Image (cartoon, rainbow, N blue to C red):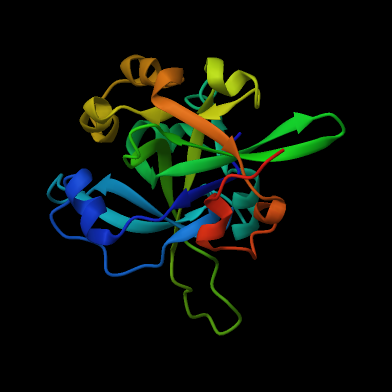
Amino acid sequence: MCGRFTQTLGPELIAEHFKVEEPLPLFKANYNIAPTQNVVAIRLKAESAQRECVLLKWGLIPVWAKEAKFGNQCINAKCETVAEKPAYRSAFKKRRCLVVANGFYEWQKVGARKQPMWIGRRDKQPFAFAGLWEWWQPPAGESGTPAPPIESCTIITTEPNELMSSIHNRMPVILPASSYDEWLDPSSQAEPLKALLRSCPSEELHAYPVSHLVNSPRNNAPELLEPVAV
């Protein structure tokens, strides 16, 4: 699975890397992104098919959900079932996105304890998880006034590559930049899209142990990315 990640890049760099014309207004670097928090994502504008940068709540809320907390069950979608599961199949067909990151955490079992590891690209470039997004309208409150809609997302996971197999039995799908257009294109067909949902090559990533401070989402500082001895 993917339960924590990092996004410490500024709006201008993200706009340049992902070819977005209008950068998202300033947002804080996040060294310990946790479910239910807002994440930076790229999607296509419906009216122009141009890429846009948006903030989405992590934890996809299907349009038919009765409560927003349903999204807590949907932070990750398995690539093997994403096209068929009721919570994801509509978004898989029509609402795909790129979730922007420059690293992610996973916990490796070491004896009786779990050691947090940070995983990122060797070339230190930003990257994108394969994501889905959804639009959900909360029910009106007692006053009858409609609440603002919530836009949310999920990250798709797949089988681990060789590097990740020693750390965890799943990993997020990291899309190559060459597949961004196909992933975002609403006219893309299911089978070619499924073919994109595979683990990235091990040689593109590196991993190292980090502090157990990352275990709490309340901790959010550059020190979380510093290697530690184990």
**In this orientation, which residue lies closer to the viewer: 183 or 67?**
183
- For the image, the number of numbered tags is 0
Instruction: Please state the horizontal and vertical placement of residue 205, each as a whole percent of the image.
Output: 44, 28
Answer left or right for 14 relative to 216: left
The residue at 61%/81% (across/down) is 142
Q: Residue 56 sits in which quadrant?
A: bottom left
Q: Residue 217 sits in which quadrant?
A: bottom right
In the image, residue 89 sits, relative to residue 75, either above or below, namely: above
Answer left or right for 178 relative to 210: left
Q: Is residue 76 visible?
A: yes
Answer left or right for 136 relative to 76: left
In the image, residue 66 sits, relative to residue 121, either above or below, namely: below
The residue at 54%/63% (across/down) is 221
**In this orientation, which residue lies closer to the viewer: 161 or 206?**
206
State the residue lying farthest toward the bottom.
Answer: 143
The residue at 64%/57% (across/down) is 69
Instruction: Please state the horizontal and vertical placement of residue 46, each as a whole percent of the image.
Output: 21, 49
Q: Is residue 63 visible?
A: no
Instruction: Please state the horizontal and vertical placement of residue 208, each as a whole percent of the image.
Output: 57, 36
Which quadrant: the N terminus? top right
Which quadrant: the C terminus? top right
